[in-house]
Image: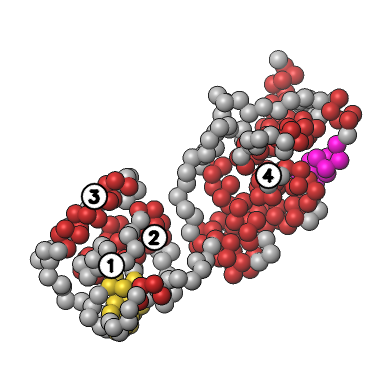
Amino acid sequence: MSWNPHIRLELNAASSRAFADALESFEEWRGTQEPRDLDLASGWKTITPEIAEAMLLRNPLTANRRPTLATIQYYARQMLKGDWKKTGQPLIFSRKGTLLDAGHRLWACYLSGATFETFVVGDVEDDQPNLFAYIDNGKARSASDALATAGLNGQSKLIAGMVTISAHYEQGCYTPTAKKRLERISPPEMIGYVTDRPNMRTAARLMASEHKSAAAIIGFKDVAAFAAFQILELHDEGTLDEFMTELDSINEADHADGSPIAALQKVLDVDKTNKQPMNKHQVLGHVIKAFNAWVRHEPMKKIQLRVNEEFPRFIGPQQAADEAVQQEAA
């Protein structure tokens, strides 16, 4: 006899309201079901969506923390990509077969259709009061923790911030006035992202050492390091060194000559005294505009991010040369 899930939900498109309705529907149905036979002997198990449903039937909605859609989407994405590894973190059941810990993992499996392998502990004593309060009460590992354990200790927090900015930038999430929300980046995705982009580590190191003063002028270390990463990706270390050195050593003559770097420092200086200073991505937008004008050798006395314009993108040497030729022809 084929199995069909009682609940179906398109995780990527589901709203919080639709998810809450699904939970309530499952809970109402759970109350009409008899417990299904399950192998809960402690050991490694393969959890299919069908098994996940049977396990969730042993988990009253009010028994543990209420599942959250964002966490389930986050887990499901990793399971479907094959990034859910056999870490030994178990699904926990009492001797009576009550689910004590693993609700989010099981919902992710159940609703996504993914299958995962995990260790099951099925013999926790039932007579321990408030047992749930002692489960998962440690400090959660962050993305920067994952980078540190992958050999990036010392710059892990800065690089994690760079990755967040980079992901938003690559996916067009920035506008002059707002920032669109992205899915949470998992620790394995974070490590893979940095591994595939070695210039990130170089940029973080340079902005934390040789160009520390320039980073302080920009104001946000991760914004400065991401800008450095983009310059390294599109140009070279010499271009980065020249731009950041100028940013750290401008004078009154630079302002008079219409230096884009002087214009950048001016807008950043003014912003530090504003009651509502710019957000990180708005600072980044000004840095991009200044760099692009600088690399085109274009005078600029004032930098603005206009509400109705597209968010700027860093340009490479060929684009800078082409645009310079077009300006001369005009």
Give the mark nearer the N terminus: 2 vs 1.
Answer: 1
Along the horizontal axis of the image, is 86 left or right of 33?
A: right
Give the mark nearer the N terminus: 3 vs 4.
Answer: 3
| Residue with the mark numbered 2 | 75
User: Badge 2: few (under 14), some or many (20 or more) residues near its Cα, within 10 Å?
Assistant: many
Task: From the top left corner, tell me how far across and down residue 7 is, in percent.
Answer: 20, 55
Task: From the top left corner, tell me how far across and down residue 161 is, in percent.
Answer: 60, 53
Amino acid of disc 1: Ala
User: Badge 1: few (under 14), some or many (20 or more) residues near its Cα, within 10 Å?
Assistant: few
| Residue with the mark numbered 4 | 227
Camera sees residue 10: no
Quadrant of the rendered image containing residue 6: bottom left
Q: Quadrant of the N terminus?
A: bottom left
> Which disc number belongs to residue 258?
none
| Residue with the mark numbered 3 | 21
- Nearer to us: label 3 or label 1: 1
